[in-house]
Image (spheres, rainbow, N blue to C red):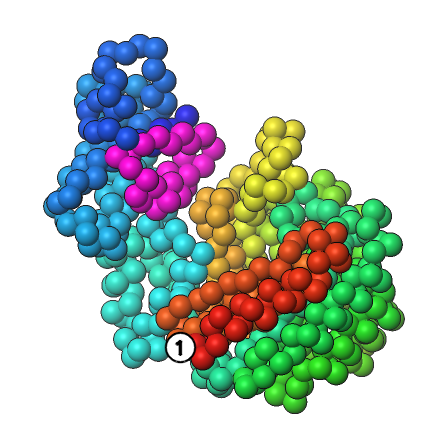
Amino acid sequence: MIRLHLTNEAFEQDIRPLLKSFFSKEELVVSFGGRPVNLPFGAEADDETADWGRYLLAGDWRDDGFVLSLYRDGDLTCAVQKEEKQVPFTERKKFRDEVKRAVYRMLAAETGKELPWGTLTGVRPVKQVLERLEAGECPESIDAFLKEEYYCSEEKRMLSLAVAGKEKELLTELDYKNSYSLYVGIPFCPTTCLYCSFTSYPLSRFGHQTGAYVEALKKEIAASAKLLADKRLATVYFGGGTPTALSAEELRDVIRTVKQYFPTETIAEWTVEAGRPDTITTEKLQMLYDEGISRISINPQTMNQKTLDVIGRQHTTEDICSAFAEARRIGFDNINMDLIIGLTGENAEDVETTLRKIGELSPDSVTVHTLALKRAARLNIEKEQYQDKGAVQVSDMLTASVKFAKEHGYAPYYLYRQKNMEENLENVGYARPGKEGLYNILIMEEKHSILALGAGGATKLVLSGGERIERSENVKSLKDYLERTDEMIARKHAFFEQYKGLY
Ligand code: SF4
């Protein structure tokens, strides 16, 4: 167990992910109050009944600076690491950055470990790199900034700069400031994957409600089409869940409803996540192609049958290959495949197998995810059962994927991170030239507004030229979505009304 004790709640959210990254397998206990230096919690140093954990990190916030102390094995008489800094508490950002760097130095010195992303713990590490590039700063100066401010490793600095450079190039062609994107969520899947934390209902139990869902969604589509009428619609993304869990007729109905109500002539990209191979049929692929869907995603996650069985997929690796071959035969020339590194029980050899088989299929883009343990996922809820099957050497496996991408002509074009990712790593989208998923960049770098429809959809309004972002979330539960469609539509209209003139 690791303990974090702070004067008050300030900066807890900044320190917590660093502790979780250095001590990923240990429980973290957090407490507040008092002056924690030397004698945390007002306790006596020789109090043998207290459990101080394997490490205790104590943070003392003062008006003119801070003191951080790290104690080992309950010995509170002498800190094994200590840092003090003079910085006004009122300068919050500066104070926070100094605290994070000090915590990092102390933990790195004590554990002998370095984190590839250093003190960068946020979801969008490339966002500020892109902003700096767009402001005209040279790559060398941004590289130095990432190194000095965040202790980022050379590998991650190079990756961030490569991704931001690619994004800048693609965004220049898009006139993103005067456009928006549309997300349409379909919350059904054949079964629920072990690691799933999305809004997803298994067809075996909820399949009888797809028709009602399509009707409610069509109503929301029709009612939302004018919300951003003075902007161009740039990209449309059907996600979920798995949109192809619907029948061909139902999905066509949804796509045609979008075409009926939204202006389609400016759309640069139509993506459908055909995610699960067990939902893909020739009829559905042909329908998507005929409807003008330009990009699809067929997501194996792994090409090892034993892992597919463990994570709750009810299809074979051959199903993945035949769905892919069928999509190519029909004419799709922009197919993405998603992979996950760090899946339960997989070792470096398993990842090599997956990469080799994906290489043989030769998709146009590959998105490599590092497994994140989300609270709601079955993998987390039942983690004791799966603990001995945990992934090892995740960063080595990720390195193998980087090599694979380079050898097969893919360049990184978007990147994001999630909380609780294995070894604090990242998800990277790689694509061959001209096959990048534009929607992925737009949503990840928060470049323009996203109008999201369907259960679990999160609308994001980018306000005042990107200075501010406001969110409005649709209900997540299928039952609520079906029963409260009108109420939800009214709420969304009120949300847009509230920020009128700012987007
Ligand atoms: S395919 Fe995706 S959305 Fe569906 S259950 Fe699996 S992880 Fe969840």
How packed is label 1: few (under 14 Cα within 10 Å), some, or many (20 or more)? few
Closer-to-camera residue (219/244): 219
Closer-to-camera residue (492/170): 492
Residue 15 seen from this side: no
Q: Position of residue 416 (x, y in %)?
A: 48, 59
State which quadrant residue 229 falls in: bottom right
Q: Position of residue 156 (x, y in %)?
A: 39, 58
State whether residue 121 is above or below residue 460.
above
State whether residue 438 is above or below residue 239.
below
Q: Position of residue 404 (x, y in %)?
A: 55, 61
State which quadrant residue 277 falls in: bottom right
Label 1 secondary element? helix
Q: Quadrant of the N terminus?
A: top left
Residue 98 seen from this side: yes
Number of numbered callouts drawn: 1
Which residue occupies the extreme bottom position in the image? 265
Looking at the rendering, the stretch of residues picked out in magenta corresponds to 6-32
Q: Residue at 50% across / 52% down in the picture?
A: 418
State whether residue 495 is above or below residue 98.
below
State whether residue 113 is above or below residue 412.
above
Q: Residue at 36% across / 23% down in the picture?
A: 54
Q: Position of residue 319 (x, y in %)?
A: 81, 57
Q: Which residue is mark 1?
A: 465
Q: Is residue 21 magenta?
A: yes
